Image: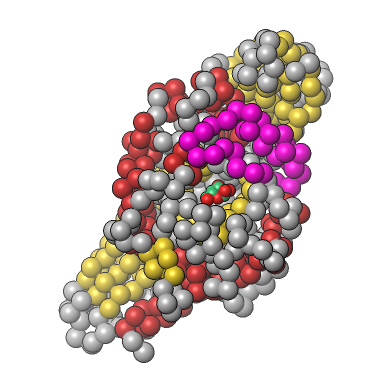
Amino acid sequence: MTKLARIVTAVSLGLLLLVGFGRGEDPAAKLRSDQDGLALTPPMGWYPWNEFGQEPQNEKLIKETVDALVRSGMKEAGYTYIGPDEGICFSRDASGKLTPNLARYPSGLRGLGDYVHQQGLKYALYTDAGTHTCSKAMPGTKGHEFEDMKAFAEWRADYVKVDWCNTAGQTPQTAYPKLRDAQLAAGRPIVFSLCSWGQGQPWKWAASVGHLWRTTADICAPGKASWTAAMKNVEANEKLSASAGPGHWNDPDMMITGMSGLSEVQNRSLFSLWCMMASPLMAGNDLRSMTESTIRILTNREAIGIDQDPLGTQARIVRKDGAAEIWAGKRLFDGSQAVLVFNPGEAPAQVQVTPGDAGFEESASLYVRDMWTHQTSGPRAGSIRVTVAPKDVALLRISKTSSFPLPPIIVADSYRVVFHASGHSAQKLTKAIAVKNNGSSELPLWTVSPGLPSWLSVTVTPSGKTQTFSNQVSVAGLRRGHYHAVVKADNREPLSGLPMSALYYDVDLDVSGAAGGPANN
Ligand code: GLA
């Protein structure tokens, strides 16, 4: 075996052991997320397409956007997944292997992934189920599904969006399950985002294949935010509320909030609609030059709490009053209810929201919290009267109690731990990562999955809403070489008892100078 082959074998074995899924597992499980615990709340992050299209997607843009996401407070608000979309990232060489485009991504696609992970974010990449991506500037996966998903795993992608261009003769119902099998075989836990724009009606079958699926055409052409097009996506997506839930989400496309051409009111309304629809919150604007107003909207933790609710219910329009729409049917983890009054019309709307609209008995005495003014009123009986300006919303949380807890928002200081050891002695090294919950509760201790390799042990200690994962490696007996493991941890939201999305991070260990020669495990 070559050194590289040995490393890859060690990595794959380690992953299969730790994560517990691979070729042997039943790919027809009810939900894809049953196998990996991923995306139990809608994924949050950023993708470049809506603002930039193909140009200028490159390493500089992605790194600058990572920095802007952290600086703006979006990371603290829960935005996690980030990376290039159709950004001319790779080509296929003569042997059929994907090769990173080093002119655009000088650190390579693995190097960019490492940067993202070290900032405490997760790495998103893009490909296509057909022969080529939409512009034909990148190869698609058709006929190379297994090699390509292995490449994505080696680049350490945590999220892969798979487009549907150049797919003549293929059907989503067969192409996407094959890619699912290829991802499972590659052994790295990956959020799978299907992007057939609703073709093949993925909401009927794709919950066992991926974690989210586009329900509509593109929300805009690159750089050209359109309120009208966004409203079409909302209309189509609203009808599919029954298909969404933890680990399987309807995706009405990346957001356009904060792009030029939209007013503050429109930005707030679009964001509120995405939160009510439990939609993935993938920002699509230029994070490097956001206004204060856009930052306030995108980081409104009370609104995000509605989107990230552990019950994962998608709201629907329960009633119309003139032009105004009353969106409800979204019970939250603490027994409160989210209600949106949206006025797409041209004149101010006055609407009475009844306790019944909100899912309570008509006689209930209720507290009402406004997610945009951050004011609570009540207790009160009877209808709640709201006046909503044209294109604006009232986004409310209604409860029998006056407390409005936020669900967990998990923020890590890093998703990668790197050790360098000389290997000359029975050296023990420790490095920690801190995982914080920006929601209301203190979480139970994260439970690390068994099956860590013998050179690694992990202990978790709490300190208020932060828990520290101490990673200890024992170099004794290890040969020279590179070792890699993925640590998985699980938790439960304490109020509802519901499982939370699994936490995964990479541990790399380089052992140099050991007496025993190269690693052979
Ligand atoms: C499709 C997708 C978009 C984007 C482009 C890239 O149109 O729906 O989100 O990924 O391809 O070409």
Residue at image x 72%, y 28%? Answer: 327
Residue 7, magenta (yes or no): no
Q: Residue drawn 34% across and 74% down? A: 483
- Asked which quadrant contains residue 27, the reply is bottom right
Quadrant where the N terminus sits is: bottom left
Closer to the camera in the image, 399 or 521 = 521
Work out whether residue 397 or residue 79 is closer to the camera in this orientation and state it.
Answer: 79
Quadrant in the picture for the C terminus:
bottom left
Judging depth in this view, the residue of 90 and 412 nearest the camera is 90
Horizontal side of residue 418 vs 177, given as left or right: left
- Looking at the picture, the colour scheme in use is secondary structure
Q: Quadrant of residue 280?
A: top right
Q: Position of residue 248 (x, y in %)?
A: 65, 51
Q: Is residue 73 left or right of residue 179?
A: left
Image location (x, y in percent) of residue 421: 22, 71
445 relative to 389, above or below: below
Residue 286: image quadrant is: top left
Which residue is located at x 53 percent, y 32 percent? 225
Figure label count? 0
Q: Is residue 101 visible?
A: yes
User: Which residue appears at 33% of the width and 57% of the height?
Assistant: 105
| Residue 401 visible from this viewpoint | no
Residue 7 on image: x %, y %: 36, 79
Against 205, residue 378 (above or below) is above
439 lies above or below 116: above
Image coordinates for residue 376, horizontal then vertical, percent: 59, 17
**Could you tell whether 323 is left or right of 295 in the image?**
right
* Residue 57 position (above or below residue 275): below
Q: Which residues are magenta?
A: 216-245
User: Does 230 lie within the magenta span?
Assistant: yes
Q: Extreme bottom residue here?
A: 1
